[in-house]
Amino acid sequence: MLGAVGAGAGVTVLPRYRWEAELASGALVELLTPEDPPINTGFLVARAGAPARAPVTAVRERLLAAARDW
């Protein structure tokens, strides 16, 4: 994710320790400073109101199925 964002592919949510050097160099900027910052939590994000996309739906279904055993 860090590489994709650094290449201009959008935004991501990462623990600060994963991109501290890029922040210090100015290669990346922090958009939000949440009260409870992320750790190594993964997020699946889809645009609200956008048509369903098969790859995103497949990942979501797979995650939900796996989460039953967490």
Image (tube, grey):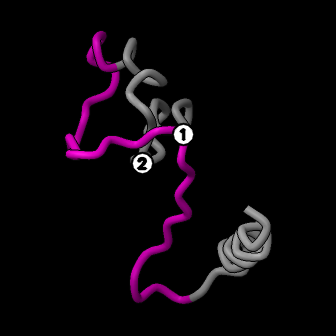
- Report which quarter residue 17 is drawn in: top left
Q: Main secondary structure of the magenta part?
A: loop
Q: Position of residue 69 (x, y in %)?
A: 79, 67
Q: Residues within 10 Å of mark 2 (few under 14, many from 20)?
A: few
Q: Number of labelled discs? A: 2
Which residue is painted at 56% across and 52% down in the image?
A: 42
Question: Do labels 2 and 1 touch, CB within 8 Å?
Answer: no
What is the number of the mark on residue 29?
A: none
Query: Disc number at residue 10?
Result: 2
| Residue at 28% in and 45% down | 36
Find the residue positioned furthest to the front.
70
Could you tell me residue 57's position as x and y percent?
A: 68, 79
Residue 51 % position (x, y): 53, 89
Say what secondary structure mark 2 lies in. Answer: loop
What residue is rendered at 56% in x and 63% in y? 44
Does residue 31 belong to the magenta stretch?
yes
Q: Quadrant of residue 68?
A: bottom right
Give SS at disc 1. Answer: loop
Magenta residue check for 26: yes
| Disc nearer the start of the sequence (2/1) | 2
Task: Identify the mark at residue 40; answer none if there is no mark.
Answer: 1
Quadrant that contains the C terminus: bottom right
Q: Which residues are magenta?
A: 23-51
Residue type pointed to by label 1: Asn
Give the position of the N terminus as an image quadrant.
top right
